[in-house]
């Protein structure tokens, strides 16, 4: 059974928030999952894997110590936080490559590189250990699965063109992935009380009129 | 002399947004004009409903390049299950808008899934999912009268306004349906909410046919519902809090709606001289507007007070128009200046009406009302801390007087309930909800971000700030978007003890083209859609536009 991309985005946003990320990062997580499915990759699975590591409860350890190159953290870098910094720093790519060490679920960096490509109106090459992927604003050349961890990642502006293929318009998350993301998403929902049923939503008037 | 748009600080107050009226940019009217202009063809290809009112029907609208089919399921709903709330689990009728013409397998699949709504799944072939409940009193009246060979009582029709009201119309990817992004390049779906508006338009036709069918089931000699009475019938809609977060979360989209209407107003106010034709259109629609206002009723104290004020304004406008010098230079600007002596309800009524005589100045703006770049905004991390501060201060200048440490100013919190996942508004200090709060208080968050930014050096970058303060990422995003979307931010406290969410609902619903706003509480409103609209077999360019204004005297 397929899902719409907006369902996948919405679930990803809620799951990231439920895992403890701030709203702005959770919004980026939703956009990242949408972007990956559109680019033909399973975006939901790597997010589910990442959230299970629980990095959001120790952000200081898993985000960059500073924005000085190469980027590194005290512990493995979270690709959502690193990705956010990458897209924030997009303009700097014009001057020099961006490098980062020790990154978890590096496939999640692709959408942020895509955002940089959109801002710069130029494709971006990403080297993830032995793999090389080119992305533009909406597509990537990735056709295989990337490893779950990368020791060394670099991004630089590229002159390569990403072949123009039809964008994906559905998501096919596995049952396992859905279960994991849904469990995180549920943490954003307030348990219902009878009081909130009546007060929180409004009308206690009969609708049988 | 070109008149400027009204500034956001005037327009984006909740009291004004909660006083907006439909206008010629409304999404329903965009659709009916297009359907008539492009000569859409309509057909009812199935109507397999038994004497108990159970079965299904298919209505197809053929646009020039695509067809869209409403697949409607009619059910037998026990009275005790009839609820407008999103937590309901059964309805009088359920619907999907199918992209194309469904075959038997599609109907079978939809029968299983559509009737259970959120508990089912639809596919990328479906563009919307919706449901409706009968207005019990009007439904019984119309069926009984027709079965007796009589026409229904027009005063009852007008008192209720509709035979069924929808309680949700889900589009864009909800429950597995196609994403808007997949179809928004089609010219007929480029404007916002056209899928939803088409769904409701076809539902209205189905409901008219169903009530006729059930009258005939009672008596084969039942009267045929008089088309002029049928035309008075709209489709109701019952809307709760779900719409309120939408206009905060879709900052650029909401900006585009408001900015387009403001640009339309500025263009009309800038017109040097009004022709007789234009003045006649205005005055004729003004007299029809009075009928619309006089037929608008509500039992809710807030709306009753607003209606009393509006009716006083109507008398004042009447008096002013009787002697209004339309021959003066920039007459619409002069009329606008007069409108500023009225209540916000009255002002916005006149503003909407002033756009009517000028389709050439106004209608083309409709193409700017969607948000084509919804996922495209990327934070500019190279922006300096000093610039970010200035940006936030300017976007939220109106909020500097709010004391965010005062309990009344943060009395409420928006959250999503575990039950049916509906948005709710709770009392922060009385319910255990703060941990689940949604990011729907941009001004409060902006104040907190400014506080955090105050200890950063001016020349530092936003990227560096956000690295250490990811909690303010959504604030910086909104502030940067504010540069391109100055009308995207509601300039009122959305978590204060005084907040009336119905103002947010009305702002959105007015752009749909809704009329007869009838709040059921401060966070729940019923409205009417398509009342007065021609049915598919009647639709033509002559009646496709002004149907919202009743052709009867007040």
Image (cartoon, coloured by chain):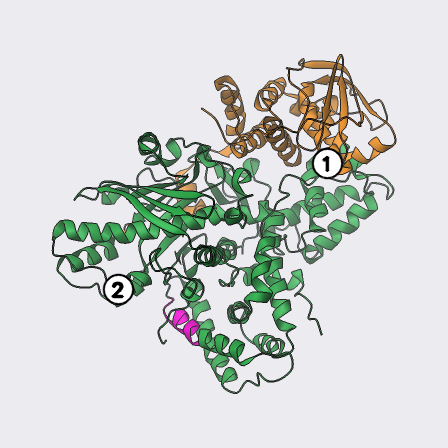
Chain colours: A orange, B green
User: What's the magenta bit mostly, secondary-structure-wise?
Assistant: helix
Q: Can residue A207 be seen from the camera position used here? A: no
As drawn, B204 above or below A173: below
Residue B11: x percent and y percent? 61, 62
> Which residue is at the front of the view, A200 or B157?
B157
* The quarter of the displayed image where residue A72 is located: top right
As drawn, A168 above or below B66: above
Decide whether residue B289 is among the magenta residues.
Answer: yes
Asked whether the residues under the numbered discs 2 and 1 touch, taking CB atoms below 8 Å apart as contact, a structural biologist would say: no
The structure residue drawn at horizontal position 62% and vertical position 33%, both measured from the top left corner, is A31
The subunit letter for the residue under badge 2 reads: B
Residue B40: x percent and y percent? 41, 52
Residue B341: x percent and y percent? 57, 77
Same chain, labels 2 and 1: no
Badge 2 is on which residue?
Answer: B156
Residue A45: x percent and y percent? 58, 20
For label 1, the SS is: helix
Badge 1 is on which residue?
Answer: A118
> Which residue is at the front of the view, B31 or B114?
B31
Q: Quadrant of the C terminus of chain B?
A: bottom left
As drawn, B91 above or below A17: below
The structure residue drawn at horizontal position 57% and vertical position 40%, both measured from the top left corner, is B438
The residue range painted magenta reads B287-296
Give the Cα distance between marks 2 and 1.
Answer: 57 Å
* The quarter of the displayed image where residue B534 is located: bottom left
Looking at the rendered image, the disc whose residue lies closer to the viewer, 2 or 1, is 1
Q: Quadrant of the N terminus of chain B?
A: bottom right
| B63 with respect to B340 (left or right) | left
Decide whether residue B33 is among the magenta residues.
Answer: no
Q: Can residue B495 be seen from the camera position used here? A: yes
Dot 2 crowding, Cα within 10 Å, few <14, some 14–19, many 20+: some
For label 2, the SS is: helix
């Amino acid at each position: 059974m397929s899902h719409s991309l907006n369902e996948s985005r919405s679930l990803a946003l809620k799951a990231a928030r439920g895992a403890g990320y701030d709203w702005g990062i959770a919004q980026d997580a939703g956009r990242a999952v949408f972007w990956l499915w559109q680019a033909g990759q399973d975006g939901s699975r790597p997010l589910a894997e990442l959230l299970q590591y629980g990095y959001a409860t120790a952000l200081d350890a898993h985000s960059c110590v500073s924005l000085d190159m190469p980027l590194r953290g005290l512990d493995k870098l979270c690709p959502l936080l690193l990705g956010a910094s990458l897209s924030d720093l997009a303009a700097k790519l014009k001057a020099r490559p961006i490098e980062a060490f020790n990154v978890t679920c590096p496939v999640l960096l692709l959408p942020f590189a895509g955002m940089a490509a959109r801002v710069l109106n130029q494709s971006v090459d990403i080297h993830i250990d032995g793999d090389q992927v080119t992305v533009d604003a909406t597509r990537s050349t990735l056709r295989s699965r990337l490893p779950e961890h990368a020791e060394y990642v670099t991004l630089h502006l590229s002159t390569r063109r990403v072949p123009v293929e039809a964008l994906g318009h559905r998501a096919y998350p596995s049952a396992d992935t859905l279960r994991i993301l849904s469990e995180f998403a549920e943490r954003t929902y307030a348990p219902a009380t009878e009081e909130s049923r009546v007060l929180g939503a409004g009308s206690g008037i009969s609708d049988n009129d | 002399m070109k008149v400027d748009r009204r500034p956001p600080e005037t327009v984006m107050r909740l009291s004004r947004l909660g006083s907006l009226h439909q206008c010629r940019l409304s999404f329903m009217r965009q659709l009916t004009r297009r359907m008539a202009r492009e000569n859409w063809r309509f057909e009812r290809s199935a109507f397999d409903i038994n004497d108990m009112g159970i079965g299904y029907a298919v209505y197809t609208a053929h646009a020039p390049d695509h067809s869209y089919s409403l697949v409607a399921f009619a059910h037998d709903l026990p009275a005790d299950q009839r609820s407008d709330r999103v937590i309901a689990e059964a309805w009088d009728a359920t619907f999907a808008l199918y992209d194309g013409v469904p075959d038997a397998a599609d109907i079978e699949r939809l029968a299983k899934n559509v009737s259970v709504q959120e508990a089912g799944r639809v596919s990328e072939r479906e563009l919307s999912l919706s449901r409706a409940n009968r207005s019990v009193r009007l439904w019984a009246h119309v069926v009984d009268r027709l079965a007796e060979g009589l026409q229904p009582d027009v005063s009852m029709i007008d008192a209720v306004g509709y035979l069924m009201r929808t309680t949700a119309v889900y589009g864009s990817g909800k429950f597995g349906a196609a994403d808007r992004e997949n179809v928004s390049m089609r010219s007929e779906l480029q404007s916002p909410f056209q899928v939803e508006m088409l769904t409701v338009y076809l539902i209205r036709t189905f409901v008219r046919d169903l009530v006729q069918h059930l009258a005939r089931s009672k008596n084969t000699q039942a009267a045929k519902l008089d088309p002029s009475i049928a035309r008075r019938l709209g489709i109701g809609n019952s809307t709760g809090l779900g719409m309120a977060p939408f206009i905060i979360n879709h900052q650029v989209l909401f900006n585009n709606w408001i900015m387009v209407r403001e640009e339309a107003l500025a263009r009309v106010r800038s017109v040097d001289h009004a022709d007789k034709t234009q003045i006649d259109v205005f005055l004729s629609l003004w007299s029809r507007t009075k009928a619309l206002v006089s037929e608008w009723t509500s039992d809710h104290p807030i709306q009753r007070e607003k209606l009393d004020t509006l009716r006083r304004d109507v008398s004042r406008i009447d008096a002013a128009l009787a002697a209004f010098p339309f021959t003066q230079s920039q007459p619409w600007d002069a009329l606008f200046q007069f409108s500023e002596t009225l209540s916000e309800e009255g002002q916005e009524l006149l503003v909407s009406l002033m756009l009517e005589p000028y389709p050439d100045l106004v209608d083309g703006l409709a193409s700017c009302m969607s948000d084509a770049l919804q996922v495209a905004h990327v934070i500019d991390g190279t922006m300096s801390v000093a610039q970010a501060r200035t940006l936030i201060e300017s976007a939220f200048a109106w909020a500097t007087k709010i004391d965010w440490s005062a309990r009344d100013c943060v009395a409420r919190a928006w959250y999503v309930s575990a039950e049916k996942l509906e948005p709710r508004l709770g009392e922060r200090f009385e319910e255990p909800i703060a941990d689940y709060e949604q990011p729907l208080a941009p001004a409060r968050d902006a104040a907190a971000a400014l506080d955090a930014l105050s200890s950063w050096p001016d020349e530092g970058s936003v990227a560096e700030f956000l690295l250490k303060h990811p909690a303010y990422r959504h604030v910086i995003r909104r502030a940067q978007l504010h540069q391109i979307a100055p009308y995207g931010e509601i300039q009122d406290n959305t978590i204060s003890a005084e907040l009336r969410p119905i103002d947010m609902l009305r702002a959105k619903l007015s752009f749909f083209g809704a009329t007869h706003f009838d709040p059921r509480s401060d966070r729940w409103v019923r409205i009417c859609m398509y009342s007065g609209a021609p049915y598919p077999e009647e639709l033509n360019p002559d009646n496709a536009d002004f149907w919202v204004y009743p052709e009867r005297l007040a």
